[in-house]
Amino acid sequence: QVQFVESGGGSVQPGGSLRLSCAASGFPFSSYTMKWYRQAPGKGRELVAIISQLADSTYYVDSVKGRFTISRDNAKNMVYLQMDNLKPEDTAEYYCNAPPFSVWGQGTRVTVSS
């Protein structure tokens, strides 16, 4: 079955960095666009970044442009989110997903606070 397992979250001070990882399984990973989402406390889920099947195209929500970098390793069925210059407003639970699957992992929590 389709499964996503996110990891790498933690607590950092503003300006810090984290690298999130997502292990995907149960589908032909290299054939699917991958996405990172986040959900801040009390808010809805927000699309953060997208990467195409061959990693030749990426998209970022305006609020993270220039700070976050999405990447993937098709040989390992992994997608990553490098987050630099973190801000308090980046505090959220982060999830990866591949449309059209409606399965969600447990997420990984990122807390940015001084």
Image (spheres, grey):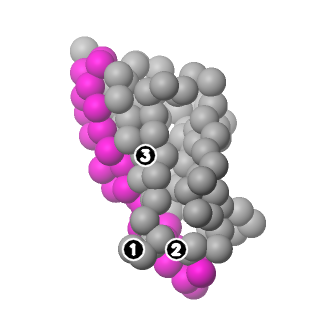
In the image as oriented, which residue stretches furthest toward the right? Answer: 100
Mark 1 residue crowding within 10 angstroms, few (<14) / some (14–19) / many (20+) = few
Q: Which residue is mark 2?
A: 3
33 and 56: which is toward the camera: 56
The residue at 29%/19% (across/down) is 15
Q: Earlier in the sequence, mark 1 or mark 2?
A: 2
* Above or below: residue 8 compared with residue 53: above
3 and 48: which is toward the camera: 48
Give the number of the mark in front: 2 or 3.
3
In which quadrant of the rendered view does residue 91 lie?
Answer: top left
Q: Is residue 113 visible?
A: no
Picture coordinates of residue 89, whole percent (x, y) = 47, 20
Boundaries of the magenta span: 1-28
Q: CA distance from mark 1 to mark 3?
A: 15 Å
> What quarter of the picture does the N terminus occupy?
bottom right
Does dot 3 land on a helix, a strand or a loop?
Answer: strand
Identify which amino acid the numbered label 1 is placed on.
Lys
Please state if 33 lies on the left or on the right of 68 as rendered: right
> What quarter of the picture does the C terminus occupy?
top left
* Above or below: residue 63 compared with residue 30: above
Q: Which residue is mark 3?
A: 81
Does dot 2 land on a helix, a strand or a loop?
Answer: strand
Identify which amino acid the numbered label 3 is placed on.
Leu
Query: Is residue 64 covered in magenta?
Result: no
Mark 3 residue crowding within 10 angstroms, few (<14) / some (14–19) / many (20+) = many
